[in-house]
Image (spheres, coloured by chain):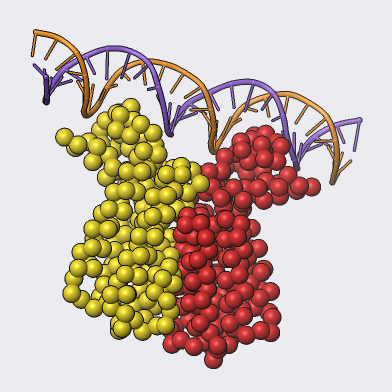
Chain colours: A red, B yellow, C purple, D orange
Amino acid sequence: MNDNRSRLTKAAQEIVQRNGFKGLSFRTLANEIGIKSSSVHYHFPEKSDLAQELIEQYSEHLALELDEIAAKPISLKRKISSFIKIFEMVAKADNLCLCGMMAAEVGELNQSNQQYLRDFFLMLERWIVVQIEAQPDELKTQMAPSQLAKTMLSGLEGALLVDRVVGNHQRLNAQKELYLALFK
Amino acid sequence: MNDNRSRLTKAAQEIVQRNGFKGLSFRTLANEIGIKSSSVHYHFPEKSDLAQELIEQYSEHLALELDEIAAKPISLKRKISSFIKIFEMVAKADNLCLCGMMAAEVGELNQSNQQYLRDFFLMLERWIVVQIEAQPDELKTQMAPSQLAKTMLSGLEGALLVDRVVGNHQRLNAQKELYLALFK
DNA sequence: ATAGTTACCTATCAGTAGATAGGCAAGTGG
DNA sequence: CCACTTGCCTATCTACTGATAGGTAACTAT
């Protein structure tokens, strides 16, 4: 039923993570799944509607993954490790985080899109804080959880950005080493 | 003599740091300084020529700043602090690092541009390593200098990225706190 | 049966992109 | 004085962008 619609968002997500939101055109997107660009407009009247859905889907998908990790009876360190692994999977595909990419292009997004982007980053940071506060004695640093969450998230986003240019995963690995050392 | 040429690169740099390389058009750039787009092509036959000059200038300008910092007879911690201050100035202007921005758009840059981008990040990381190795006993962590440099640089780049979306400087401040704590 | 909805299509639009051809005035060097 | 270069111009090109109008066949609910 929603076959083409979901194929569209799937293909669009990949294009944005690789080429950016500006690098996504209705025509190439339509070609990729074998329909016409006007049909893409049927599903997403304006490009910002597509942006909205992409950010929402990406956020929801990630939120589900994080819920699963949070529910496991494992150490805080292993939870953080699983969090970082999500970024490693993105790096492996030579992609950026969808929202990290759109963050670079924030100037051309409308207010609603920008708000969803903001919420994405805040959601990830909050998740880290909640995990720490659930197992506070497994934290080795005196750094406030909210501060730690902010450095960790932005650090991982930056590692994806720089690593993709330099062509290896050294920065992501270095971030991983740095942050995992802060947990018992 | 090179009046318009330097005005072009200056205006172009600002546009790229704000809107990205794709957000820079020869027409709007020309309008900004009051000439025609064809005249921009006189100075930079192709857009990649402009990209090359932007990255080169940005790298050279930063290298000079870093040379000055390195030459000062100050503590390692203060040198790192000065390094971070450069990023704070960028954040203050609500910009991204020029090369951080272009890193997000690396897919649409030619091989030469990509190499210059790579060299930019490696140069910054090398600077950090050199400063640490010149005053090694002022480092409080056992983390290898090259690892530390990689996390620091990518962390700062990511902080600029996320902070610009969220709308404050909390991540850059958090990164600063985290990294300065590693030096005596 | 029929009215409405869904999901596509063809055709087209105005706007903008990077890029090129060719001209023109001012300055420069032999 | 003349050839050449510099630095801009006008005019134009093709390609591509997001977006819209209007049509059509298939499905759906009354």
Residue A100 in sight from this viewpoint? no
Would residue A8 be found to the left or right of residue C23 on screen?
A: right
Q: Which residue lies most toward the bottom here?
A: A137
Picture layout, residue A77 above or below residue B36? below
Could you tell me residue B110's position as x and y percent?
46, 42
**In the image, is residue B24 above or below residue A122?**
above
Give the residue drawn at x 26%, y 63%.
B66
- The residue located at (39%, 60%) in the rendering is B122
Expressed as whole percent of the image width and height from the top left, the position of residue A18 reads: 56, 50
**Residue at x-position 65% and y-position 63%:** A61
Residue B149 seen anywhere in this rendered image of the structure: yes
Q: Quadrant of the C terminus of chain A?
A: bottom right
Q: Nearer the viewer, residue A92 or B127?
A: B127
Q: Nearer the viewer, residue A50 or D14?
A: D14
Image height check: is A20 above or below C2? below
Q: Residue at x 48, y 81 (%)?
A: A145
Residue A33 position within the rendered picture, expressed as x and y whole percent measured from the top left: 70, 41
Quarter location, residue B53 = top left
How far from the left and from the top, in percent, is residue A11? Answer: 65, 47
Using residue A130 as the reference point, say whether residue B14 is left or right of it.
Answer: left
Q: Quadrant of residue A133?
A: bottom right
Relative to A42, A139 lies left or right: left
